[in-house]
Image (cartoon, rainbow, N blue to C red):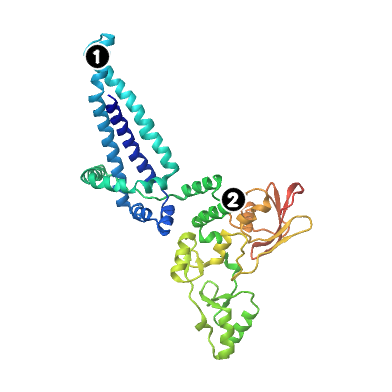
Amino acid sequence: MVSVWAIAIGLIFLNSFFVAAEFATVAARTTVIRKSALAGDRLATSLLPILETPRRLDEYIATCQIAITFSSLILGAYTETNIGPGWAAWLVEHFKIDHLIAESIAAIAILIIFTLLQILIGELLPKSVSLQHSERIALFMYWPLRVTSVILRPFIWLFNGSGVALLKLLGVPASSHRHVHSLEEISLLLAESKDGGLLEPEEHERLHQALELSEKTARQIMIPSPQVLAMPIVLSMEEAYRRVLTSPYTRLLVHGTDVDDVLGYVSVKQVIQSWFTDGERGSLKQLIKPVPFIPENLTLGRLITLLKAKHSHVAVVMDEHGAMMGLITVNDILAELIHDIESDEFKHPEIVEVLEDGSVRLSGSYKLNKAIKFFGKTPESDAETINGLVLEILERVPEVGDVVDLGTAEVRIEKVEHHAATLVTITRKGGGKNV
C-alpha cells in the first residue's frame, strides 16, 4: 500500500512539474532571458528563440498541457484501480454495507481526496512558485521539456492540428502565444515596478510620459505656423545672409509664394559659408534640404519611424486642405518627453516670466499640458494651448483686458495679435503662488 501511495503522490508531483513549467514559460520576461543569453548563459540562448517564435512557443506550451492531462488521467485511473478495492473491502468489513455501495463510497472518497491534493500540490503551489521565479524555473525546465516534447510529438501534432481545425470550423481565428502587452498593460507593469522599488519615481514618470507620447498626434505638439520663422525663396543671397545673421536659430524654413508653399529648410551655417564662398553667385535654392509633409493626426510613434526613414529631424504638419498648420521637430518630441528641454528651432521663444505678486506671464501659445502647474488643477478642455482654452471659454476672439476665471486661477489677456491671445498672465486665487 505504501508503494501505491508513493506512485500516486509521484504522479501529483509530476503534474506540478509541468504546471510550473507552463506558467514559468508564459510569465518569463523575454528581456531578462535575452540579457542572460547575451551574458553567455547557454540555457537562455537555447530558450530565447522559443520565447520569440510563436509557433515554437505554441508547441512548447502544448507539451506542458498534454503532459498535465496525461498525468491527471493516469492518476485517476491508477488510484481508482489500486486504492479503490482496498477501501471498499475495509468499508464492507467494518460497516457491513453492500459491496456495490462500498465501491461507490470509496470511489467518491478517492475522487475528493486526490482532487484536493491535485489542486493544492499539483496546481496552486507550482503556479505561485513559478510566477515568483518564472525566469529561473523556465531555464531549469528547458531540457526536461525538450525531451518530453520529443516523446509527445505525435500527440502534439494531433491535438494542435485538431484544435486549429476546430477553430477554423467555428470561424474563430487561431492565435499564438506571444509575449506582448497593450499600452495599458505596460503602464500597469510600470506602476507595479515603481511600487515594488524597481523603478525610481523619476524613472517611472519618464517611462510613463514616453508611453503617453506615442499616442499623441503631431497637431498636439507642433509649433503653430504663426510662430514658425521662415524666409521666401526670392531673397537674394545677401538678403538671406543678413536674415540668418539676425536669427538665433540654426535652421530656417524656406517657402515659395506664401508660407503654405513650403519648399524645405536651410542650415544657417551653409548660408553663411555660401555667401563667403560664392557671394551673389550663390543660390539659396541649392541649399534647400527637403522636409517631409505629414497629416495633423499622425501619431508620434509613426512620426518617429517616418523621420528615421527620411533621415530628417523636422516635418511640416499639413491640414486636410493642404495648408501648413505648423512644424514639428525632434526637439519638440524630446521636449514633450523631458519637460526640462525646450525646443527653440524654427520658432520664436516662449515667454515665461514670474512677476513680483507671484503671478506668471506666459505666451498664449504655451502648451496647456505644461501650463497645468500654474492653474492649480487640470482644466476640462480639448484645447492644446492657453489661447485655445481662452477661445473655448470666451467663445469669441479675445480682447486685451479680458479675464477668464478657471476656478482656482484667473487668466488675464495682455496682448492680442492676429485674433489670438499672444500674452497672458495667470494668477492663482487665494494668494497661492503659481510656482
Which-is-in-front pick, marks 1 and 2? 1
Observer-nearest of 314 and 365: 314
Task: Please tell me which residue is depicted at 43% across the width and 69% down the height of the picture.
Answer: 309
- Three-letter amino acid code at disc 2? Pro
Q: Secondary structure at mark 2?
A: helix
Position of 347 compared to 103: left or right? right
Numbered-mark total: 2
Q: Residue 41 sits in which quadrant? A: bottom left
Residue 278 seen in the figure: yes
Q: Position of residue 334 (x, y in %)?
A: 56, 63
Observer-nearest of 256 and 274: 274
Residue 201, which numbered label? 2
Q: Residue 280 sits in which quadrant? A: bottom right
Question: Could you give the CA–CA distance between mark 1 and mark 2, rounded to whole angstroms?
Answer: 66 Å
Mark 1 surroundings within 10 Å by alpha-carbon count, few (fewer than 14), some (14 through 19), many (20 or more): few
Residue 329 seen in the figure: no
Relative to 416, does residue 167 appear above or below in the rendering? above
| Label 1 sits on residue | 101
Q: Position of residue 116 (x, y in %)?
A: 36, 27
Mark 2 surroundings within 10 Å by alpha-carbon count, few (fewer than 14), some (14 through 19), many (20 or more): few
Position of 32 compared to 327: left or right? left
Q: Position of residue 417 (x, y in %)?
A: 66, 65
Quarter the C terminus occupies:
bottom right
Task: Please tell me which residue is depicted at 27% across the width and 28% down the height of the picture.
Answer: 3
Quarter the N terminus occupies:
top left
Position of 100 compared to 208: left or right? left
Residue 208, which numbered label? none
* Precedes in sequence: disc 1 or disc 2: 1
Observer-nearest of 63 and 381: 63
